[in-house]
Image (cartoon, rainbow, N blue to C red):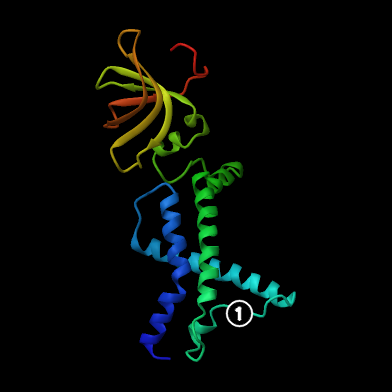
Amino acid sequence: MELSDFLIRVVFIGLPGIIGEQIYQKLKSKSVRKDWEDIIEIVLFALGSYAVYGLIVEVLRRCCIWDLNPPLRALFDSGIKISWLEIAGASFIGIILAFISAYAYNRKWWNRLGQQLHVTKKFGDEDVWNFFLDLPESAKWVFVRDYKQDLVYYGWIKAFSESERKRELVLMDVQVFSNSIPKALYEAAAIYISRESDEMSIEIPNANKGDTK
């Protein structure tokens, strides 16, 4: 097999890994990464996708439901045509693996396991901003103190920026108060806030919405 032909086959057969890695990166909390880390993730998603696909193929063969060739044969044998059914099936599995992996990453499964085993006290790789806003309590009603405008916003967080960017929040069903004077000012269906990290703070109250500040 010529090198150019082999590389073309690697690119096409590697599509499940590329698709899985891209979706995974979109779903997980972002962090500063190196190129070699992306390459490793692509390889892992590709291998995982074809491993699951191969297992499904083997089950179908043993059950005499569908006689399919084992995966990745076309990668090493130029006489075998690339199977687009194989690539499509592995890509679909790669998407599922990406969602599962992102869910595990965002829920800090590995860190929680390490904490249970007393191996680590780390909560994850991202900064405290992401950790705090990923808490289940942060999906409820919160107070946001805006020191720049001397205001307090009471609402629930619809969206927030990634850690490496400027601190941004979208609050829904918002009540706005003065921070220095206990006074209600107005209400808004939604408010977008963009501040530096030291210009606001977020508090999670024990009381339910409807209680006074």
Residue furthest out toward the right: 63
Q: Residue furthest front?
A: 189
* Residue located beneath label 1 in the image: 70
Q: To which quarter of the image does residue 86 belong?
A: bottom right
Q: Tell me where residue 195 appears, x and y as whole percent.
A: 27, 31
Specify the quadrant of the image occupied by residue 67.
bottom right
Please state the total of marks drawn on the protein image.
Answer: 1
Name the residue rendered at 48%, 41% in the picture: 123
Quarter of the view holding residue 63: bottom right
Examine the rendered structure and indicate whether residue 205 appears above or below residue 117: above
Q: Residues within 10 Å of mark 1 (few under 14, many from 20)?
A: some
- Quadrant placement of the C terminus: top left
On the image, the x and y values in percent for residue 171 come to: 38, 29
Image: 157 above or below 29 = above
Residue in the picture at 39% in, 40% down? 127
Q: Residue 119, can we see it?
A: no
- Rendered view: 194 above or below 31: above
Residue in the image at 35% along x and 25% along y: 201
- Side (left or right) of 48 relative to 68: left
Q: Quadrant of the N terminus?
A: bottom left
Q: Nearer the viewer, residue 142 or 44?
A: 142
Question: Under tag 1, what secondary structure?
Answer: loop
Where's residue 104, x and y in %?
A: 54, 49
Residue 116 visible in image:
yes
User: As displayed, is residue 189 above or below residue 2?
Assistant: above
- Residue 79 position within the rendered picture, expressed as x and y whole percent measured from the top left: 50, 92
Residue type at the position of mark 1: Pro
Q: Is residue 181 left or right of residue 138?
A: left
